[in-house]
Image: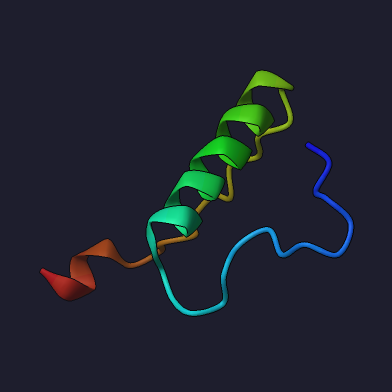
Amino acid sequence: MTPLAGRPLASPSGLGVLDLAVGRFVYGETVRAGRIHVVEDFFHDLSRHG
């Protein structure tokens, strides 16, 4: 993916539909390229919130 020079990739105004779409695209491209990495214990304490 090559962003256009001088153009923002996503708006900084919160988690909107554009942000979700960009995230899904980046995730898909990362999986497709075989460059996905799992961070073990990222959510280390799931029982804390019931």
> What number of labels is visible?
0
| Residue at the limit of the structure toward the left, as seen here | 50
Give the quadrant of residue 37: top right
Location of residue 41 with respect to 28 vertically, above or below: below
Nearer to us in this view, 21 or 33: 21
Residue 23 placement (x, y as % from top left)? 53, 48
Residue 29 placement (x, y as % from top left)? 65, 29
Residue 20 is left or right of residue 48, and the answer is right
Residue 12 placement (x, y as % from top left)? 57, 77
Query: Residue at coordinates 49% horizontally, 58% vertically from top-left?
Result: 19
Residue 4 placement (x, y as % from top left)? 83, 50
Image quadrant holding the N terminus, namely top right
Location of residue 22 with respect to 19 vertically, above or below: above
Location of residue 6 with respect to 40 vertically, above or below: below
Image quadrant holding the C terminus, namely bottom left
Residue 47 is left or right of residue 14, and the answer is left
Nearer to us in this view, 26 or 34: 26
Location of residue 24 with respect to 8 vertically, above or below: above
